[in-house]
Amino acid sequence: MKKVFITALMVMSFLLIQKSANAQLEAGLAVGLSSYQGDLAPNSISGSLSQLHFSGGVFGRYNINNYVAVKLGLNYAKISAEDAKASTDSQIERNLSFRSNIFEASFTGEFNILGYQPYNYERIFSPYIFAGVSYFRFDPQAFFDNEWVNLQPLGTEGQGLGGEFPEEYKLFQIAIPVGVGVKYALNDQWNIGLEVGLRKTFTDYIDDVSGLYGDQSLILAGNGELAAALNDRAGEISDEVIVREPTSQRGNAEKDDTYIIGAVFISYNFADNGLVGGRRKSKRKSGCPTF
């Protein structure tokens, strides 16, 4: 999958460069908010809205026709979650938390529902839908003993110990971005818009939480004291001594994590692709829209 994605990015980049002379190319900036849904924020509404962070990116878009476009994007997003902000007592008592920076390269296709072609006031506004593939890097951290600690190298759920413990997870992963947006032409050179996209990932470890607590003594012996301490943090807020069974549930391994990016964007049309020219009303009558 990694090789296929990198090949697709290279082909797309070559296409954008080759086609720029024909001026179907635009480039832009996006700024917005990001959030996450997973084991520490299972509720998509309250969990996501309470933990919003900054996101930003750059992109190049090639407009194939009025209805279809392809886009290559580079995005940054920050996500985090805390059990302390949860709405259920069991999750609050678990007392886990994390933060992560996400760096993403994406290749998506867009469909303009109304058609988008502002030249001569033909179609200057359209909602659109998009879907594609992205390759991203994440790196979950937890705040412990007055410092931020990288969680993946520790193996907090016993990753890498073999037997019934899970395998080590990779920090580079594939995701499927899907979403909706709207775009509007300010004039012949500039476009603005808004889009919201969900990234469906194939990992349950964006938050470093997935399956069982595991045998604490084996985690302590195999992965160290810090891994064992961050495996179960309930004792930090409880006066009682908590003894976990190795099969106690730490997270929900049946559902992978997702992250969400919502952004406003502005883009510039580089040359005459039908978007650049006098913005005068056309005297001809438009027929039925064609693809």
Image (cartoon, rainbow, N blue to C red):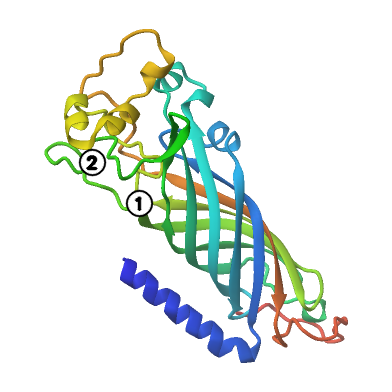
Label ID, residue 202? 1
Residue 117 visible in the shown view: yes
In the visual, does 260 lie left or right of 289?
A: left
The C terminus is located in which quarter?
bottom right
Residue 59 is situated, as x and y percent measured from the top left of the image, at 59, 69
Q: Which residue lies under the disc numbered 2?
A: 159
Separation of disc 1 and disc 2 at Cα? 17 Å
Q: Residue at x 38, y 70 (%)?
A: 5
Q: How far across and down, in percent of the image, does residue 197 sit?
A: 55, 54
Residue in front for this viewpoint, 256 or 17: 17
Question: Label 1 amino acid?
Answer: Phe
Q: Is residue 41 visible?
A: no
**Residue 52: percent from the left, percent from the top?**
60, 41
Is label 2 in a helix, a strand or a loop? Answer: loop
How far across and down, in percent of the image, does residue 282 sit? Answer: 85, 84
**In the picture provided, is 84 more to the left or to the right than 239?**
right
Query: In front: 288, or 229?
Result: 229
Nearer the viewer's eye, disc 1 or disc 2?
Answer: 2
Mark 2, Cα crowd under 10 Å, few <14 / some 14-19 / many 20+, is: many
The type of residue carrying mark 2 is Gln
Give the side of residue 266 with respect to residue 62, left or right: right
**At x 40% / y 12%, what residue is drawn?**
238
- Front in this rendered view, residue 117 or 162: 162
Mark closest to the chain's N terminus, 1 or 2: 2
Residue at the image point whose x is 88% and y is 82% from the top: 280
